Amino acid sequence: MSPQITMAVAGRVLTQVRRDHRTVAMLLVVPCVLITLLWWMFLDLPGDLFDRFGPGLLAMFPFIVMFLVTSVTTLRERSSGTLERLLTMPLGKLDFLLGYAIAFGLLAAVQSTLAVAVSVGLLGLEVTGPVWLLGVVAVADAVLGAALGLLVSAFATTEFQAVQFMPAFVLPQILLCGLFVPREAMPAVLEAISNVLPMSYAVDAMQELVGAADTAEVWRDVLVVAAFALGALALGAATLRRRTP
Amino acid sequence: MMKNVVEVRDLVVVRGEREVLPGISLDVQAGVTGLLGPSGCGKTTLMRCLVGAQQLRSGTVEVLGEPAGSAPLRTRVGYVTQAASVYDDLTVAENLAFFARVLGVDRAQVDEAVDAVGLDDHRDQVVGRLSGGQRSRASLAVALLGTPDLLVLDEPTVGLDPVLRRDLWDLFHRIADRGAAVLVSSHVMDEAERCHRLLLMREGRIIADGSPDEIRRTTGARDVEQAFLHLVEGRGDAA
């Protein structure tokens, strides 16, 4: 592994993204629009529904978007032969994976800063904990999404299949993360499943930050998310083979 | 005797159910070596073995005295796949600058490589908007970075016009004149005359090995294409 090569990969991925203006616009604008839509939807209802659902959405954006973007880009890298070429060069598998994680982590940081700014500044989301910690949680979520995207791209042979992994991998996590039904109120089996899904901890971290302001609890959740991300990256590394059949 | 850059011994490669290379042995020395044979005869698989991208069943592949694909070789071997393996959404210069950083090669070599493949007028164009021939030349330029001692080129001249093909063959010879070994695969037999040495391949085996002159002489054929047909059909009669 070499920091120079890792940064070369990260820089190259960012250049590629930058060239695609439409993707950049979607990455940055869509989360802001959706969070506004959520706020608007709850506008005439009594209670603090926006405060309850908003944080969950802030946790989901970076995860979903990075999952999709990474699974498609790495699949492209596998099928275009550029990955094979890179693996005949002095590039470590970790250089490749961390390069992607750094690039998409940075993008997620920008994306989340905007979404949080809109939520807190314009829409009046009440955050009890430190606002910057929202950014940390978002970046952890993004890296997790990117890591899982890298992993599943190994099991897809077409971009169609890669996109299909999103409902298969991500939707169950959204359903079971505790946003719709509190996790402790779920049937025992589902609660147990929910406890081993990374998104549950991501959403929990955001809700904790907004509601209880117990930063120790937030950091514990962030660590769990980071551990999942590292695990996915390690599994992803196992799917990168210098020699293929 | 010339030192071998590549030594392949009793190499067996199985892809899927098929034994693509059923125990092949060959050497490659400095100079331009042509690897000729019909599509599907195992040229690409053999080349993948030389760069360490292919899983082997048995046998050995040594490049520059090291096992193929081992870490010390990764800056010394240039490889160009059949399909252009460059990033479509980056410019020619950005692609080369990226691969140069991965290889730890000086930035100045980027310009040299761009010039060598004749893409200086297109260096700031996005690769995805270039023609097929220009894209494959961009891919070739990447392999030139770091002045490798072995260049493995899988059908680099397919789909190029005669002028470009001539220019590329001149380039291969200039690289070989520096002392490097250049292994070029092709299924177009008329390119054979431009090689120092030829390896004719069929169904995973080397059926002839020598200079174009030697091959014509031993088979009594007019050109390499005739020689190849002669060898293939001669073998067919014997079987």
Image: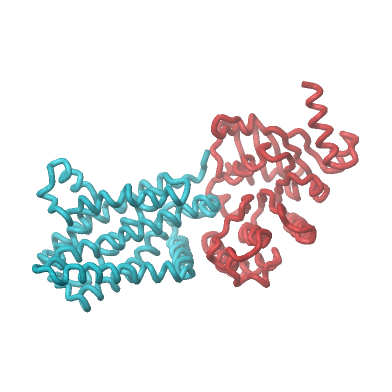
Chain colours: A cyan, B red
Numbered-mark total: 0
Q: Is residue B144 above or below residue B213?
A: below
> In the rendered view, does A231 fall on the left or right side of B181?
left
> In the rendered view, does B103 fall on the left or right side of A18?
right
> In the rendered view, does B136 fall on the left or right side of A39?
right
| Location of residue A42 by image quarter | bottom left
Residue B176, visible in the rendered structure: yes
Q: Nearer the viewer, residue A160 or B90?
A: A160
Q: Is residue B218 above or below residue B239?
A: below
Is the C terminus of chain B in the top left, top right, bottom left or bottom right quadrant? top right
Residue farthest toward the top in the current orientation of the protein? B239
Q: Is residue B105 above or below residue B124?
A: above
Residue farthest toward the bottom in the current orientation of the protein? A122
Residue B174, visible in the rendered structure: no
Which residue is found at the position 19% from the left and 57% from the top? A221
| Location of residue B85 by image quarter | bottom right
Q: In x, y percent, where is residue A138?
A: 27, 64
Q: In x, y percent, where is residue B140?
A: 65, 58
Q: Nearer the viewer, residue B214 or B127?
A: B127
Is the N terminus of chain B in the top left, top right, bottom left or bottom right quadrant? top right
Q: In x, y percent, where is residue A81?
A: 55, 51
Q: In x, y percent, where is residue A219?
A: 18, 61
| Location of residue A203 by image quarter | bottom left
